[in-house]
Amino acid sequence: MVGVIDHTYEATAVEFPGGRIVRSRVGSHLGGTLLRDRNSLEFALDVRQKDLTFALDELARLNSQRGSPFAGKLDLAAIALAGPADPRSGDARIKRIGGNRHSQEEPA
């Protein structure tokens, strides 16, 4: 299974269940207005970690929920993270990190 996270406050806009829309607080990758100051970067990393934790918790819930199309089908002991990931994600469920020139790959 492959999942993609559209990080809250980093994407131009993220729509949540119920229709709530949250706009970017760190600028635009496309418009060249990406904020790179320490506070903005720390904020973005904190949100990324929370988004990742939420996604992993939801996968675990769906994997254990009777009637879920994912029930018992996900190997939650073999989770990898790719892309512009921060190796300090802090979630022990992640076994490998890699995907860009700034990332580190951890042994499985």
Image (spheres, rainbow, N blue to C red):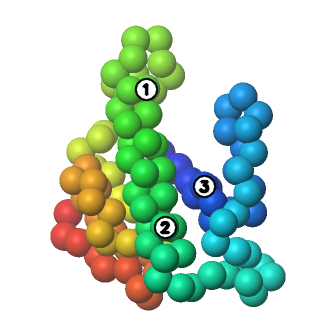
**Residue 83 can be seen, yes or no:** no
Residue 57 place in picture, x, y as percent:
37, 37
The kind of residue on which mark 1 rests is: Leu
Earlier residue among tags 1 and 3: 3
Query: Which quarter of the figure has residue 104?
Result: bottom left
For this view, does 23 lie left or right of residue 9?
Answer: right
Earlier residue among tags 2 and 1: 2
State the SS at label 3: loop
The kind of residue on which mark 2 rests is: Phe
* Up/down of 1 relative to 18, above or below: below
Alpha carbon distance from label 3 to label 2:
11 Å
According to the picture, the residue beneath numbered tag 1 turns out to be 62
State the SS at label 2: helix
According to the picture, the residue beneath numbered tag 3 turns out to be 8
The kind of residue on which mark 3 rests is: Thr
Give the residue displayed 23% in from the left and 72% down from the top: 106
State the SS at label 1: helix
Instruction: Single out the mark in the foreground, 2 or 1.
Output: 2
Give the residue displayed 80% in from the left and 82% down from the top: 31
Residue 48 place in picture, x, y as percent:
47, 60
* Up/down of 3 relative to 60, above or below: below
- Pick the residue in front: 28 or 94: 28
Mark 3: few/some/many CA within 10 Å (<14, 14-19, 20+): many
Mark 2: few/some/many CA within 10 Å (<14, 14-19, 20+): some
Alpha carbon distance from label 2 to label 1:
29 Å
For this view, does 21 lie left or right of residue 43?
Answer: right
Give the residue displayed 67% in from the left and 81% down from the top: 34
